[in-house]
Amino acid sequence: MSTHIHIGTSGWSYDDWVGGFYPDGAVQRDYLPTYAEHFDVVEVDSTYYRPPARRMVEGWRDRTPPHFRFAIKAPGEITHKKMLADCGREMDELLEALEPLGERTLCVLLQFGYFNKKTFSGAGPFFDRLDAFLEEYATRVPLAVEIRNKWWLGREYFDLLRRRGASAALAEHSWMPPVDEMIAKHDAVTGPFAYLRLIGDRHGIEKITTVWSDEVVDRQADLTRVAAALRTLAERVPVYTFANNHYAGHGPATARRLRRLLDDLA
């Protein structure tokens, strides 16, 4: 069953990984093809800050094997500034830039921040906007959705995603419910695959380090729990999991540790 669980990291362009994950002397152009020797999927975080140029996307394609997949984080202009309203031009430009990847685009991730009452009076108005967006785009590209209002993670939300065929992105995050609790409480499989992000406590870990070359937080117990949850999800759909540097201090080490735990459960 673990063959249906794909593990990668959030991003790959970290100079701090040279000398550990990447060999000594590696330069930026070496990073992605070297990364692809170890993992078969990556979450592209840089696209949150600016849409990629088409030639950049062609480079991603040309430097990775055909089975490799990319999860593309939607630009913040779409998810945080416009919050899905009047963002057709930005979304169309993103999809056009991604065309060279073809089926190697696993999905576009819509990751939202925490919405206070000044932004949305409640879950309903946001769900209405999300529903209209998914109706427009979920048939054009696979979509995964992450919200960070834990009180909104209920049946209405998961049913909305399921109706539109979008995957719920669950997060191991300092202020969100643990993913195993979410899976036990809700039917969190809403699309063709499950999506899990290991994020952790960004502010807490940055009090310990801002150099992402080694694990500095012991996450063994948490990852053991996560591994069991992934096995449960993988009984139904393929599962894609992404480890952030901020989870334990070094994304590749977290990904490898999780893979070993899954192998132990096999």
Image (spheres, rainbow, N blue to C red):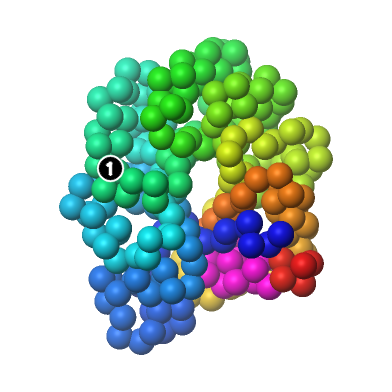
Q: In which quarter of the image is residue 94?
A: top left
Magenta stretch in the rendered image: 246-261
192 vs 16, nearest the viewer: 192
Residue neighbourhood size for the residue with mark 1, other residues' Cα within 10 Å, grouped as few (<14), some (14–19), many (≥20): some
Q: Name the residue under label 1.
A: 99
Q: Where is residue 241 in the image (x, y as percent from the top left)?
A: 58, 54
Report the quarter where the C terminus lies: bottom right
The answer to whether residue 207 is visible is no
Which residue appears at 48% of the width and 73% of the height?
Answer: 38
Disc 1, SS: helix
Residue name at image x 62 percent, y 44 percent = 194
In the picture shown, does residue 77 fall above or below 19? above
In front here: 243 or 140?
140
Q: What residue type is disc 1 on? A: Glu
From the top left corner, tell me how far across and down residue 20 is, in percent: 46, 82
At 68% across and 19% down in the image, what residue appears?
A: 156
Percent across and percent down for residue 152 are: 66, 25
Drawn side of residue 176 relative to residue 140, left or right: right
Camera-side residue of 228 and 215: 228
- Left or right of 264, for residue 6: left
